[in-house]
Amino acid sequence: MKTILSLVSAVLLCGLAHALVPRDVVVVFNADSPLSVRTAEAYCTTRSIPKENAVGLHGIKAADISRADYNRFIMEPLMEEARVRGWQWPANDKMLGKRKAAIVLMPDMPLRIQAAANLPKQFAGSGNNGASLDSELMMLGSLYPLGGPLGNRAYKKDGNISDYNAHILSVCRIDAPDEATIRRMVTEPAEVERRGLWGWAVVDEGGPYPEGDAMFHTAASYAKVQGFPLFHETSKQCIGPDFPLMPHVAVYLGWYNQWPNGPFAASAPQFRFEKGAVAYHLHSFSALSVKDPKQWVCALLQRGAAVTAGNVAEPYLGGCLDPEIFFARLLRGYTLAEAALMASPTASWQGVVLGDPLYRPFAARQATGSSSDTAFARWYRACRDSSASLAALEGQVVSRLRTPDGPVMAEAFAWHCAEINRMDKAVEYFRMAAELATDKVDWTRNLLMQITAEYNRGEKAVAESLMKRMLEQTMGSPYRKAIELSADTVVEERRKARAAEAAARAKAAAEAAKAKKAAAEAKKNAAPAKK
């Protein structure tokens, strides 16, 4: 009998897509930027993209360009190159030639097309006609109104793009705040996809709108049934300041904060994603720049991610890349270009996707999962073979506790138990994981989670005792802020003190407002009457 894991895997992975191939991709670079030229050459070499698929554009000088400059320096030259080279853009069926499916933009290409007034009548729409360059290029070769988002016919599709005539390009870009990160974005994906991407999945839902939370919640369920050890944060807060996030995070999907925070903040203790990681934080303004480390897309790339996505201006929730569809399509073996296209509700709007369009992070996962020599592959096999039985899964974990896999297996099982509300088992295995930990990051995280699980199952006195001891042991810890935030919840006197401080602040604010109002009334009453 098939396990639940294998049944759901079959649904996600049956009939793996015919992947995008190098000849389908057009590489567009800024011919006046040495960095852009170097990156284009390196990318074409790494992915064996034909030289005739690389197009250099001149006259590009800024991250923001006007609609007129977009037409003059980008759109019209690309249309002419297609005519000369015998290409067909998907949006233009009248063009004859070899159909191209994707564009990848190199560093120092513009990011935004500024909104324009007084557009020609045939193009004028009723809404904002500003857009990301990437999203505008999705419609290259088509005539369409400029004013607000256009629907993407490829959204939520599943299969060969040419089979349903989406008439739309997939557009990605390779760019980052520094050249070292850019080089890594070029070289790592091709290396990682040969063995598949393995590691933790971190899903942080808890955003402001239930529609968004539902997408992240479903994405977390995909991670679970696909045998990823899963850290699933469901509170209304993002992962907290200085939280000691585990190493080897392969997938991060989260929302909702304007600036990089928690483990991803510039001030946080050092954290690095697993090589080749996919990381996406949904926020309306997460990609105001692809050069500024304070932006989400930049922070995630500089922390080691190979793929991310964001928005250059307000897209509204319905215009953002859909994390559920994006993750599901990547899991089915699609390339980044295909998965992003199928997860984008709109075109001619505000989104950008950063990463190698040919990257297939999970295509090899099923094939290598039976033989891969990593703790994460062994967790995958344990989930696959346990027939959805907690006892069977626990038995497989116990058999690996005294091996180098022990810390990962114990913690993965603890999180699994917490997810299904078996807090007794969660406490037991977080404790084991802390005891097996070989560094302070893992010890701190697992002890914090043991205390939290004790608290959540009603053992508040036990949680308080453990927390007080931890506070004594971690005076100089770089994760002290996260520890103290947990202590504020768990330790009774700290909780009471925090409540008293909040009440005092509220009282002082009320008294200040009352005094301000009284002063205003006195001033009014003292004013001389008008003659």
Image (cartoon, rainbow, N blue to C red):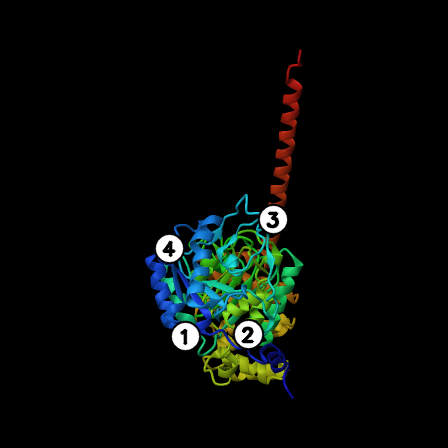
Name the residue carrying label 4.
Answer: 58
Furthest toward the bottom, the residue is 1
Q: Label 1: few (<14), some or many (≥20) within 10 Å?
A: some
In 3D space, how far apart are the residues under numbered discs 3 and 1 (Cα atoms)?
A: 43 Å
Furthest toward the top, the residue is 531
Quick one: quadrant of the C terminus?
A: top right
Name the residue carrying label 3.
Answer: 127
Q: Nearer the viewer, residue 10 or 510?
A: 10
> Residue at coordinates 42% horizontally, 60% vertically from top-left?
175
Nearer the observer, disc 4 or disc 3? Answer: 4
Q: Is residue 166 visible?
A: yes
In 3D space, how far apart are the residues under numbered discs 2 and 4 (Cα atoms)?
A: 38 Å
Dot 2 or dot 1: first in sequence order is: 1
Dot 1 or dot 4: first in sequence order is: 4
Name the residue carrying label 2.
Answer: 331
Name the residue carrying label 1.
Answer: 191
Dot 4 or dot 3: first in sequence order is: 4
Going by the numbered disc 1, the residue's amino acid type is Glu
Going by the numbered disc 4, the residue's amino acid type is His
Nearer the observer, disc 3 or disc 1? Answer: 3
Q: Nearer the viewer, residue 307 or 511?
A: 307
